[in-house]
Image: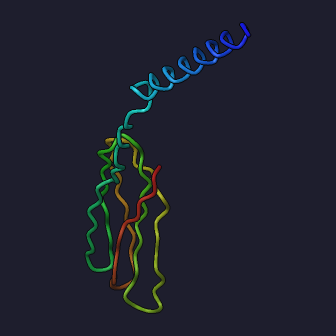
């Protein structure tokens, strides 16, 4: 009969230690809200069309690289659409992308891919 009170006391001690450890973890050791990730900013690009020429100037003000690509759709059906190769714009860097059609340009735009 003397063994049962000792086992109960040991079980009670273990349960108390487990609960207090769980409460300490929940109280501030890694269970708090995590900071939101910094939003990704793309390079700022200004695209201009003048006749049959398209030009885009891109500046990356973010600390991470950005890959940019200029796309051009020509106005004439026989004039193929043109895309530049993707170019990596490093932090605080500037690139210029150009493309042209034989005659007029219908539309020009820049796409971004995380670098």
Give the residue at x 64% y 13%.
10
Pick the residue in front: 13 or 3: 3
**What residue occupies the far bottom of the structure in this picture?**
77
x, y percentage for residue 49? 27, 74
Q: Examine the rendered structure and indicate whether residue 3 appears above or below residue 100.
A: above
Residue furthest to the front in view is: 1
Q: Is residue 106 left or right of residue 19?
A: left
Q: Closer to the camera, 110 or 78?
A: 110
Q: Is residue 18 left or right of residue 73?
A: right
- At a point 31% along the width and 41% down the height, the residue shown is 92
Q: Residue at x 34, y 48 (%)?
A: 39
| Residue at 46% across, 80% down | 81
What is the basis of the colouring in this image? rainbow
Q: Is residue 10 left or right of residue 93?
A: right
Q: Count the labels in the image.
A: 0
Image spot of residue 5 (x, y percent): 66, 11
On the rendered image, what quadrant is the N terminus found in?
top right
Q: Is residue 111 above or below residue 18?
A: below
Residue 71: image x %, image y %?
A: 42, 71
- Residue most toward the top? 2
Relative to 72, does residue 55 appear above or below in the rendering?
above
């Amino acid at each position: 009969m003397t063994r049962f009170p000792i086992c109960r006391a040991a079980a009670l001690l273990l349960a108390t230690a487990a609960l207090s450890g769980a409460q300490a973890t929940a109280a501030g050791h890694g269970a708090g809200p995590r900071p939101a990730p910094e939003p990704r900013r793309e390079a700022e690009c200004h695209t201009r069309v003048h006749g049959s020429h398209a030009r885009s100037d891109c500046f990356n003000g973010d600390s991470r690289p950005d890959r940019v690509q200029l796309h051009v759709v020509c106005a004439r059906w026989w004039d193929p659409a043109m895309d530049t190769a993707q170019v990596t714009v490093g932090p605080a860097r500037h690139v210029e992308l150009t493309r042209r059609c034989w005659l007029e340009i219908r539309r020009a735009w820049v796409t971004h891919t995380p670098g």
